[in-house]
Every structure is written in structure tokens, then in C-alpha cells.
Amino acid sequence: MALWHIIALAIVQGLTEFLPVSSSGHLILFSHLTNLKDQGVGIDVALHIGSLIAVVIYFRREMMEMIRELLSAKLKPDFSKPYNRLAYLLIMASIPALIVGFCLRNFGMEFLRQPKIIGCTILFYGLVLYFADRFFNSRRDLRDMNIKDAILIGLAQCLALVPGTSRSGITITMGRFLKISRVDAAKFSMMLSIPVIAAAGCLEGYRLFAQGNISEILAAADAVFYSFIASYIVIYLIMKWLQKWTYLPFVIYRVILGVLILTFA
């Protein structure tokens, strides 16, 4: 792949991974709209790894506190400690998607990368996000979350295996249904991306090295680097945005995009 192609994909990934608009859907649509060859799942995963690194660095204080409290408790659940509690909530929320993703790894999901399916999911889940954000007032934050909340958000994350749904969008939507504040719903969603993306990255990385395709490995490395830069900038901006504003602009964008895709697909 040409470097400019990788950079363009990285920008698309960075702009869409943590906004509730579906990064995988946009990455697939990019190839359809530009008549470029679909980059494939391998590059998609590499782009997501770049986003994962951005999340870890942005939330480095929270990550270090979780590690510290987990080690001090000898990896045992201790919900009296806030970061130990947060770590185990993230672990429990990750389990459903990890199980479903592992079971479907050899199922053949390429048929889901069709524009019509992406158009439907972008439109439908955008409307669901609007309903949750508009009518479920914020009363709770991360300190109020419990095991049931984590499992429900984790189950919602499984829906993101269908391109166009948006992993961040559907987990934020469930968070809003549970009356978690916009900022904390987004924060939990971003940190929740770490286990799932890391698992997918390990599987895809093993495949790349097993095949020994040097050009594909180098392309994946470039994708990780440029995606990290774009993703970090977007994380910073979206967290600032949510302190004052709602998800409405992203809902409007999803509705318009979904209608356009279904019209011209």
C-alpha cells in the first residue's frame, strides 16, 4: 500500500474511532468511495491498535492507578478501592465481546462489509443514540457503576461486530440508557476498547508474522503510527466537547450519511 493511502486511512480511523460514528464502517466506505482496493481486516486491526495506544497514553494516570490497586490487592477484587473496582468492571464488560469475537473468528464476516448493511446500521444506531442521549438524564458517574451496568455495556459492545454500528457509539448509548453522564460514558467506552482491540491485535499480529509478508508488516506498522497520532488528537478534543455539548451533531451526521449510503448503494 502507498504511504498516502495509509495516512488517509489513519486520519479516517482517528476521526471516527472515538466519535460515535463507526470507524470500521468509514474504513470500508473509504475504499468504495475512492475506488481503491479494500485495505482488508489486517490493516483495519493495525489502525485500531494505533487508537488503542492513544487511549492508553491519554488515560495513563487511570491505567497506572488501576495497575497499582490491582497489585496491592494481589489481583483480588476489592470494590472499596475505586480503581480496583473500575478495572474489574472493565474486565467484566470485555468478556462478552471477547467470547463472541473468538467464536466468530472463522465464521467469515466479509459479507457484513457491504454498503447497504453499513448504511442501515449507521442510520438505525444513530437514532438509538439520540433517543438515549435525549431522554435519559445523567444522574450517575463511574463511581456509581455496578456489575450489571458493566455486563450490559459489554453485551452492547458485541453489536459492534457488525460494521457501521460503532463500538464507541453503542457502548456510549448503553451508558446513556443507564443514566451515566456523557463524559463518563465516553471515558468507560474508550478504556473498554483496550482489551478487545488488544486481543484482535494479537491474533492479527500472529497471522502477519506467521505469513512473513514483510511489506504487509511494514504497512501495518505505518498504520499503527499514523492512527495513534490522529486518535490522540481526537480523544483530547471529544473529551473537551462533551464537557459542554451533547451527541446531537454526531447523530445528525449518522442520519445524513446513512440515508446517502442507502440511496446510492
Image: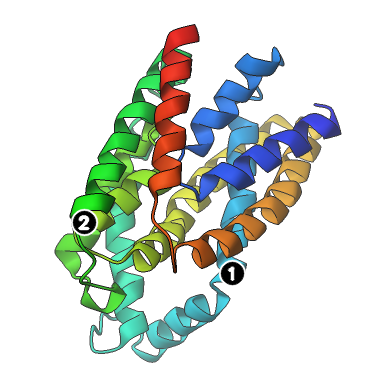
Look at discs 1 and 2 and give the one toward the viewer.
1
Judging depth in this view, the residue of 175 and 193 nearest the camera is 175
Q: Could you tell me if residue 199 is visible in this image?
A: yes
Task: Name the side, left or right, on which 63 lies relative to 232.
Answer: left
Judging depth in this view, the residue of 113 and 100 nearest the camera is 113
Q: Which element is circle 2 on? A: helix
Residue at position x 23%, y 89% in the image: 80
Give the image quarter of residue 229: bottom right
Q: Could you tell me if residue 37 is visible in this image?
A: no
Residue at position x 40%, y 60% in the image: 186
**Residue 207 image offset from top left, x and y in percent:** 61, 35
**Residue 238 image offset from top left, x and y in percent:** 53, 59
Q: Which residue is mark 2?
A: 151
**Residue 2 image offset from top left, x and y in percent:** 84, 28
Looking at marks 1 and 2 on the same chain, the residue that comes earlier in the sequence is marked by 1
Q: Is residue 118 above or below residue 145?
A: above
Residue at position x 27%, y 61% in the image: 92
Q: Amino acid at mark 2?
A: Ile
**Residue 152 image offset from top left, x and y in percent:** 20, 53
Q: Amino acid at mark 1?
A: Tyr
Q: Are marks 1 and 2 in contact (CB under 8 Å)?
A: no
Colouring rule applied to residues: rainbow
Q: Which residue is mark 1?
A: 58
Q: Is residue 72 above or below residue 33?
A: below
Give the image quarter of residue 77: bottom left
Judging depth in this view, the residue of 42 and 115 nearest the camera is 115
Check disc 2: other Cα within 10 Å, few if <14, some if 14-19, many if 20+. Answer: some
Q: CA distance from mark 1 to mark 2?
A: 25 Å
